[in-house]
Every structure is written in structure tokens, then in C-alpha cells.
Image (spheres, grey):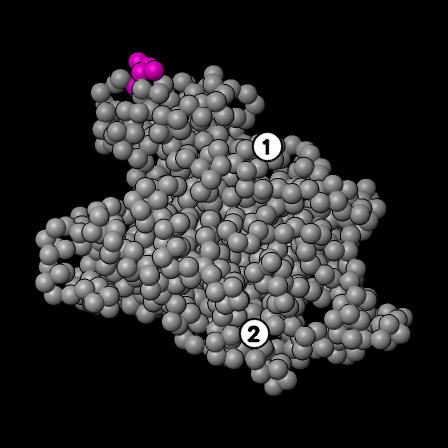
């Protein structure tokens, strides 16, 4: 039995932040319907629109992998009849989740204030970059913005080089966790009180809130945190060291003198490690460049996976830097069933991913790859909304359902 | 939203954020820490005074919770924890797998005594499996979870974000898992175990990268501030900005607007001013052309502050964003207009400062920071009093070092 069996979610929007959030529900039994249109496809559908991809908007691996278990209804929202179909879907839904810029929903008359008149217990979440209010709400969004504005970009990289930012746009993975939580909390609230609600989430603000420690340290002391490579204010040595092979590395994090002694022993007490300057954290900190250099010289000829196994067995925090091939073969991820193979009609076998939550009474279910655009228009309109097939046919012919 | 939900938060800093989120959306969260204070109450300290009540990390991540002290490793402490858990809806913990079981206060026991309890474990690799016993905080899970391999300069080791990110993904992920289990309980009447892995969480930061790689393998490597072929992060006069030379019809107007801005400062070379943007595609530029563009744009950005550039960008719809530090974030008009920050008073410490408030704006019940983080054992009398343990009993427990 799925946690969200019977829950109906309607999704409008594109990209990652919105669609990643609704998967928490789709993977656990909810019916999640996306409104999309071939007139303005989700940009993740066209990211891979290259001549060697004959499947067009239905051939984007990123879109397909990000949107499993969802149903796609094609609606041209620029047509009044299209908006009317969307309203019928909103009537059907328990939850509406959208991540357009603030003007889209209002333009269609589908903003919360208009919709609540029709459906007083509506539960609706908007999660665009800047939020629904404020002077910058209409500013055009792009990928790097969330990560840059909320403070992450300038904190990754080397102090003597330019900031590089953590890989990918962190707000795209961070904000959906909050959106999913808020939807679940609002469902609980509605069950107890009968009240729906509107929730306005800014992706940037989810980043700043998550960085409460950084913000409070600044507010209380004026401290401005800067990128420090892999160094840490509490651990030393604390870094990523070269290993045998092409671009192979091991991460090692030592937080106390006893842990340092464990590391020394696990390495077999090489001469450099016996240097008394390294006995205390203060000493290791004062000579950290030299320590990193020596440690790297020692790890250089060793295999990162084997070395991590040995270090962890000795009680030391260490792990290989894993590339994508390593992740696909990772035994712990395999134990958790992280990857599951599903067959996609155009792209073939694909490795889909489960999220990081395992519930003891309800496993996540990966049942269908991300849908073709409009794949479920008939099914959703006829079976869920009760449209006549002829009516759907007419709307397709009149290019409303496209 | 979560009014009436009672949460016991036994976690260390790995999952402090999870309890904070629940507390700021209405739950009654009791932070349980060992006598003397949670080991995570480390520096930096307010005013530089080495005192667990002044740990800024603690103060930042435990707002809106009540706090009790309890040594659940002792027999009496364990018994008291079990009594607290009998009336709780949720328990959050982040001890190494098996630790609480050995003390007789693990999932099996507490679930038996209170079948409605939702029990959330946040651990480095999950509660079971070949790596369940592996130790990790931030760097090791970021390394093993794939993000580090893609972050950093090609000629140097992979890097992480200096401010640890593993736990700040874990907070809302655990909260989402708890929300799911609470929803399930509405129909089943039973609580369940929510097993969250810091390592597995990291994979979602790759936004389907591993699956794309499995489908079409190619060399995927970190490339510093360059994304694809062109630069994504640039030097400004006082820091860094994010800006892309990527083209396509939707973005050309923004490139043209940038050149116009450069021209007004006398910094647009003649060739750039007369450049024919029709058909511009960054993917088909030669390396020499990219270098020429980057030199011109880069020279201009380096003469302007992040704020100057951002204000111009907002006016002209140029797609540029400053790589903000905490000061810039705290001064952003957009965030100010949405009242993201709230001042928290610390009368005992003689100070007050701003925290980011819980960010969501809703039409339902009020959400947001309710109180400063608790002092050690601040609510002992109140919380243990609710169990009927008071007066002399509490003094005896205190004398024995249980609370």
C-alpha cells in the first residue's frame, strides 16, 4: 500500500525544482498529473534536442529520469478552452504544485485568489526562484542564479582561484525537499481542520534558511565565510588526496588527536607521520600544507576503494571520491535499491533513482519512466475527469489539447 | 501546520535542522541533550567566549525548540526517555546504527511501547547494508555521493562547499520523510521507521547525472567555473558573479544588453559593438572567439562591484547574479521586502541578532521562528513536569547526573 494512495496532485511548471518535489508523492502512490504543452515544452525536454535524437521532446534522458510515475496531459494554455480544461483538473486535484514565474498562473486566472473561490479547500504551492512578491519577482530566472544568490557559489573552490560553486544548481535539489515536506504538512493540516492553504516558496530563500549557521555567524560576529578548498574549521587533516589511477582520489577527515593516531597506525606509521609537530591539532593546523603534501605522497600509489575499506575498518572517516561509474556499482546504494532499471519506449533500458528516504512499511515504487508529452491526455480526461472521447477528439483537432 | 505534533529530537548536528523545520511549522519539538550540553555546541562562540550557551551553530539550528537535558545512556535516563517517547509522535535521532538499540531505547523497543511513534534515523549511509558502519560527516559523503567528483578545477583535487552541505540537505529530507510517515499514520494508525541516508541524499544533487551517464556514457569531469564550453562564474571588482555567454534566441537580447552597458562605461570594443548576433550559438564558436568574448566581458566585470552589476542587470533584464556572501544576502532588497530575516533576542547573553526566518509565506496557520534555541536543561521542570516527574525527583535525577 502506498503512503499517498488516493492523493491527487496536479503539477504545472518545468525544470527541476517543481517536478522533483512531486515525485515524493508519485513514488508513494499518489496520482501526479503534469500539464504540459508542445507549444512551449518543458526546457528539460528540449535540452537534448539534437539531430542524433530522433524522438524530439520525448527523447530527453534528463526529463525522462526526473519524471517517472507521472502522467502527462497536453494543453495549450494560451487558448481559453485549454484553461478551462486546466480548471477541471484543479477541481479534481487535492494539491496543485507549480513553479512558473509569478505571472503565468495569474495570466490564466489560475492564481490562488481566483481558484479558492471555486475550491475553498484548495492546497496550492508555488515555488519559483524569487517568490511571489517583492521587487525582483518578475526577473528572468536561470540555472546559476539560485546557487549564486543564496550564497553557495562563492563557498566552493580554492582560496587562490576563482569560486566554482558546488556542481549543478543546489537550489534545484534543496528546495524540492522543503516543498514536499510542506505539502505533506499542509495535507495533515487539511485533514484535521478542513482548511486548505496557499504556500509561497522562494527557492533562493530555502537556500538562505538552510545556511542559517552562516547567516547567524555573520549577524552575530560579522564573519564572512570564504571558500577554503576542502579544509575544515574542526578537522585536520581534512582533504581529498590523490590515489593510483586517472583522476582517483580519497577523502579523509580527522577530527581529533585519537583519530589522527588511528590514521597513523593504519598507514603503518610512515616516517612523516611520526613528526611531533603533527601530534596535536594545533600543530597539524600550523603545518597543514606540509601535512597534506606528505599524506598525498603516501596515498598516491594506493587504490582509493581499498584504502577507504582499510581506513574505515580502523575507525577512520574516509571514502573514495566516486564518479558516476562508481555510483552505479556502489554496494551500499545497491543494498538500498537506489537504482532501478525501467524500460523506456524510445530510449531503452534506463537507470532510475530512488530518493534517500526508506519507510519500514512502504517501499517507494518506480513503475513508469517519465511520460511522453501528452501521453495520458485521453486517459486522464476520460477516466479521471469523465470527458467524452469525442469531446477530447474535438479538443485535439482544434489544437487545444496539444 | 503541525500543531499538536510532539517531537523528541535526540539528534546531533546531523539532523538539528530537521527538528528546527518541524518546530517552525508548528510542532512541539523537545531537544534532548546530554547533561553539560549537546557535543555539537562547539565554536565559533558568540563574543569568542568558550561557552556551550554561546555556540553559534547551536543557536542557529535549534530555534523554536524546547530543551531538556538527559543522559539516556544511564538506566534511569533510558527509562525517562522511554516515558517521553510514550507520548511522542515523532523521534529523530542520528546516532551510529545500533547505538540506541544497545541502550534499550531503539526503534524496536519504542515502537512496541508506542506503536504510533514515527522514528526517524539520519545516518551517514543508512541503518543497514555493507557500509552502514562506515563513519562520515560532510566531506566523505560528498565525496562518495558523486558531487565532489564534478566540483572544482580540473587540475586540482575535487572539492566540497566550505560550509557543510550534507546536513542541510538532510534536514528537509528527514522532515519530508517524517511528513510522509505522519500522513500514512492517519490511515494505518501505526508509526514507522524513516531511514534517511546522508550519502544517498547526495545523489539528488546530481539531478539525474548518474542515470544519464548509464544511458550515454561519456567522460564527465569537473571543469571549474566553466560549464560546457563557456565560463559561468566571473570575477567582479569585489567578488564573483554568475553570468553565461550561452546563446539561443531567448538569451541573445541579454548579451546585447550587456554590451550596451559595457559601451556606456566605454568598455565595449568596436568589434563587439558591431557584432552580428543573429545566429549566435556558443556551441559553434571557435576557442579563439570564446577567448575574445571572455576577455572583453571579463575586463568589464572586473571593474564593477557585484552590487553595481546586479542593479544594472535587474534594470535591463540581463541574466546575471552576484555570488553573494552573507553580508550581500542580508542586504538584498528582494529578501528584505519579503521579511526573510527576524531578530531573535538573547537577554541572557545581552544581545540580539538576525536569523533567516522560516521562509514560506502561507495563508494557513502562522509559521516561523518562535523562540531562541533553548539553554541546557531550560525546560526540564516543564517537560518532566508534564510526565508527572517534579520537585524532589528531579533534584535526585540531577544529583545523579541523569538530567
Question: What are the residue bounds of the magenta stretch?
Answer: A268-273
Tell me if I can see residue A22 in this picture.
no
**Residue at 67% in and 78% down:** A91
**Residue at 86% in and 72% down:** A389
- What is the count of numbered marks? 2
A140 vs A48, left or right, is: left
In this view, which residue lies farthest toward the top?
A271
Residue A123's disc is 2
Q: In the picture shown, does residue B302 fall above or below A130? A: above
Foreground residue, B291 or B378? B378
Q: Is residue A269 magenta?
A: yes
Where does label 1 land, which residue? A329
Q: Chain of mark 1?
A: A
**Residue at 22% in and 48% down:** B75
Tell me if I can see residue A85 in this picture.
yes
Q: In the picture shown, does residue A93 fall above or below B101? A: below
Q: Position of residue A152 (x, y in %)?
A: 46, 50
Q: Chain of mark 2?
A: A
Q: CA distance from mark 1 to mark 2?
A: 41 Å
Amino acid at each position: 500500500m502506498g503512503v499517498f494512495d488516493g492523493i491527487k496532485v496536479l503539477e504545472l511548471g518545468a525544470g527541476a525544482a517543481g517536478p522533483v518535489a512531486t515525485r515524493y508523492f508519485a513514488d508513494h502512490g499518489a496520482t501526479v498529473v503534469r500539464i504540459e504543452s508542445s507549444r512551449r515544452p518543458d526546457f528539460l525536454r528540449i535540452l537534448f534536442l539534437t539531430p542524433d535524437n530522433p524522438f524530439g521532446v520525448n527523447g530527453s534522458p534528463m526529463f525522462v529520469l526526473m519524471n517517472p510515475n507521472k502522467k502527462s496531459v497536453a494543453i495549450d494554455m494560451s487558448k481559453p478552452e485549454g484553461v478551462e480544461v486546466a480548471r477541471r483538473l484543479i477541481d479534481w486535484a487535492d494539491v496543485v504544485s507549480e513553479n512558473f514565474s509569478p505571472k503565468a498562473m495569474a495570466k490564466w486566472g489560475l492564481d490562488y485568489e481566483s481558484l479558492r473561490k471555486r475550491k475553498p479547500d484548495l492546497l496550492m504551492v508555488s515555488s519559483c526562484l524569487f517568490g511571489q512578491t517583492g521587487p525582483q519577482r518578475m526577473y528572468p530566472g536561470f540555472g546559476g542564479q539560485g546557487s549564486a544568490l543564496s550564497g553557495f557559489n562563492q563557498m566552493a573552490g580554492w582560496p587562490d582561484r576563482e569560486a566554482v560553486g558546488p556542481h549543478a544548481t543546489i537550489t534545484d535539489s534543496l528546495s524540492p525537499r522543503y516543498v514536499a515536506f510542506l505539502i505533506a504538512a499542509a495535507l495533515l493540516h487539511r485533514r484535521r481542520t478542513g482548511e486548505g492553504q496557499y504556500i509561497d516558496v522562494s527557492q533562493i530563500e530555502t537556500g538562505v534558511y538552510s545556511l542559517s549557521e552562516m547567516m547567524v555567524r555573520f549577524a552575530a560576529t560579522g564573519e564572512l565565510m570564504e571558500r577554503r578548498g576542502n579544509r575544515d574549521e574542526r578537522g585536520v587533516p581534512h582533504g581529498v588526496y590523490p590515489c593510483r589511477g586517472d583522476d582517483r582520489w580519497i577523502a579523509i577527515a580527522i577530527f581529533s588527536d585519537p583519530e589522527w593516531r588511528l590514521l597513523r597506525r593504519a598507514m603503518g606509521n610512515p616516517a612523516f607521520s611520526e613528526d611531533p609537530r603533527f601530534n596535536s591539532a594545533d600543530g597539524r593546523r600550523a603545518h597543514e600544507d606540509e601535512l597534506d603534501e606528505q599524506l598525498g605522497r603516501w596515498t598516491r600509489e594506493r587504490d582509493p576503494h581499498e584504502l577507504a575499506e582499510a581506513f574505515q575498518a580502523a575507525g577512520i572517516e574516509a571514502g573514495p571520491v566516486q564518479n558516476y561509474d562508481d555510483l552505479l556499482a556502489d554496494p551500499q546504494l545497491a543494498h538500498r535499491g537506489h537504482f532501478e532499471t525501467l524500460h523506456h519506449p524510445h530510449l531503452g533500458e534506463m537507470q532510475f533513482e530512488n530518493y534517500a528516504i526508506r519507510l519500514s512499511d512502504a517501499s517507494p515504487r518506480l513503475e513508469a519512466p517519465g511520460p511522453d508529452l501528452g501521453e495520458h491526455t485521453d486517459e486522464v480526461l476520460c477516466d479521471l475527469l469523465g470527458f467524452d472521447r469525442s469531446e477530447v477528439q474535438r479538443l485535439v483537432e482544434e489544437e487545444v489539447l496539444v | 501546520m503541525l500543531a499538536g505534533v510532539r517531537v523528541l529530537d535526540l539528534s546531533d548536528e546531523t539532523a538539528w535542522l530537521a527538528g528546527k523545520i518541524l518546530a517552525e511549522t508548528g510542532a512541539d519539538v523537545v531537544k534532548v541533550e546530554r547533561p553539560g550540553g549537546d557535543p555539537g555546541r562547539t565554536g565559533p562562540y558568540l563574543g569568542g567566549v568558550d561557552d556551550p550557551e554561546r555556540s553559534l551553530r547551536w543557536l542557529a539550528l535549534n530555534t523554536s525548540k524546547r530543551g531538556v537535558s538527559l543522559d539516556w545512556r544511564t538506566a534511569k535516563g533510558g527509562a525517562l526517555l522511554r516515558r517521553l517517547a510514550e507520548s511522542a509522535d515523532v523521534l529523530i535521532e542520528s546516532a551510529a546504527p545500533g547505538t540506541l538499540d544497545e541502550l534499550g531505547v531503539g526503534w524496536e523497543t519504542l515502537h512496541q511501547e508506542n506503536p504510533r511513534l514515527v522514528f526517524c534515523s539520519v545516518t551517514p549511509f543508512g541503518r543497514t547494508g555493507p557500509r552502514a558502519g562506515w563513519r562520515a560527516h560532510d566531506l566523505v559523503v560528498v565525496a562518495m555521493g558523486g558531487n565532489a567528483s564534478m566540483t572544482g578545477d580540473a587540475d586540482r583535487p575535487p572539492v566540497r562547499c566550505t560550509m557543510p552541505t550534507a546536513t542541510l540537505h538532510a534536514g528537509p529530507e528527514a522532515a519530508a520523510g517524517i511528513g510522509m510517515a505522519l500522513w500514512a499514520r492517519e490511515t494505518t494508525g501505526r508509526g514507522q521507521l524513516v531511514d534517511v541516508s546522508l550519502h544517498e541524499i547526495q545523489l539528488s544533487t546530481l539531478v539525474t547525472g548518474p542515470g544519464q551517464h548509464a544511458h550515454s556514457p561519456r567522460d564527465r569531469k569537473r571543469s571549474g567555473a566553466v560549464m560546457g564550453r563557456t565560463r559561468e562564474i566571473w570575477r567582479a571588482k569585489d567578488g564573483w558573479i554568475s553570468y553565461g555567454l550561452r546563446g539561443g534566441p531567448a538569451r541573445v537580447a541579454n548579451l546585447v544588453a550587456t554590451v550596451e552597458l559595457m559601451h556606456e562605461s566605454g568598455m565595449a570594443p568596436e568589434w563587439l559593438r558591431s557584432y552580428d548576433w543573429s545566429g549566435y550559438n556558443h556551441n559553434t564558436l571557435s576557442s579563439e572567439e570564446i577567448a575574445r568574448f571572455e576577455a572583453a566581458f571579463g575586463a568589464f566585470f572586473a571593474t564593477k562591484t557585484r552590487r553595481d552589476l546586479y542593479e544594472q542587470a535587474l534594470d535591463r533584464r540581463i541574466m546575471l547574479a552576484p555570488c553573494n556572501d552573507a553580508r550581500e544576502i542580508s542586504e538584498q532588497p528582494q529578501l528584505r521586502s519579503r521579511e526573510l530575516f527576524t531578530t531573535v533576542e538573547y537577554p541572557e547573553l545581552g544581545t540580539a541578532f538576525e536569523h533567516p526566518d522560516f521562509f514560506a509565506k502561507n495563508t494557513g496557520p502562522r509559521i516561523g521562528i518562535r523562540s531562541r534555541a533553548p539553554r541546557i536543561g531550560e525546560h526540564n521542570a516543564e517537560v518532566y513536569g508534564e510526565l508527572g516527574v517534579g520537585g524532589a525527583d528531579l533534584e535526585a535525577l540531577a544529583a545523579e547526573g541523569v538530567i
